[in-house]
Amino acid sequence: MNISTILLILLAIIALTISFLKDRKKTIESMMSAKSRFIETATQVIGILSLIGLFLAIIPESYIKSVLGGSSIWLSTLYGALIGTVTIIPAFIAFPLSSSLVRGGAYLVAVAAFITTLTMVGFATIPIEIEHFGKKFTFTRNMLSFIFAIFISLGMGVLLR
C-alpha cells in the first residue's frame, strides 16, 4: 500500500467517525445502503469478468490476433471500432479486457479504437436516443463520434508507440 492509499483510508475513517458522532442512525442506514450497493455492483462485475474470461477461453488467441492484430493495422483498427460500437460493457470492465487483447496480439491502435467507440458511440441505445433527441441528431452524433474515435485511436497509437 502506498502513502496516498493510506491517507485516503484514514480520511474515510475520520469522516465516518465524524458522521457517526453527528447522527448515529443516518450513518448506520448509509452504511447498510452502501453494503447492499457494493454487493450488487460486485456481483455484476464478477459476472461480467466471468463472461470476459469465458469469451477469451472460447475464442482462440490466433483469431483475436487475426482480427485485431492482422496484417493491416487500418483494417484491424476498423474492426476494433466496429466491435466497440456494438458492444455493451462498462468501460471499467473494458480496460482489463483490452489488456488481455493486447497481450493476445491485438494492435494497440485497434484496442484503442475498441475502447473509444465503446464509450463514445451508442449503437445499442439508438432507439432511446432517437426518442429523446430525434433521428438527425442521433445519427449525426453517432457518426461524428465514430469518426472522432478513429482519429483518437490513431493519435493514441502515435503517442503510445
Image (cartoon, rainbow, N blue to C red):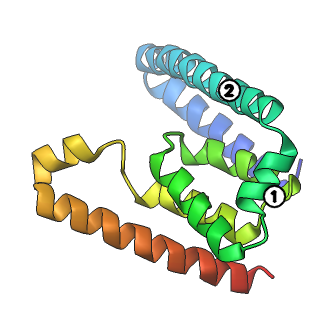
Front residue of this view, candidates 117 and 90: 117
Q: Amino acid at mark 2?
A: Leu
Kindly state the secondary structure of the residue where label 2 is placed.
Answer: helix
Q: Residue at 49% across / 60% down in the picture?
A: 117
Q: Tell me if 1 is positioned left or right of 35 in this view.
A: right
The quarter of the picture where residue 152 lies is: bottom right
Horizontal side of 146 relative to 82 (left or right) equals left
How far apart are the alpha carbons under marks 1 and 2? 18 Å
Image location (x, y in percent) of residue 149 = 49, 71
> Residue at point 74% right, 46% down?
96
Which circle marks residue 51 in the picture?
2
Q: Residues within 10 Å of mark 1 (few under 14, many from 20)?
A: some
Image position, residue 61 (x, y; %): 85, 45
Q: Could you say where residue 141 lies in the image, as x and y percent from the top left? A: 27, 66
Q: Of the numbered discs in the image, which one, if any, rests on residue 102?
A: 1
Density class for disc 2 (Cα within 10 Å; few <14, some 14-19, many ≥20) is few
Tell me which residue sits at (71%, 56%) in the image: 67
Residue 143 percent location from the top left of the image: 33, 68
Which of pointers 1 and 2 lies earlier in the amino acid sequence?
2
- Residue positioned 52% across, 25% down in the render: 21
- Inspect the image, locate mark 1, and give the three-letter code of the amino acid beneath it: Val
Residue 6: assigned label: none
Q: How many marks?
A: 2
- Residue 62 versus residue 105 in the image, above or below: above
In the depicted view, which residue is nearer to us: 149 or 77? Answer: 77
Q: Secondary structure at mark 1?
A: helix
Instruction: Give the position of the C terminus as an image quadrant.
Output: bottom right
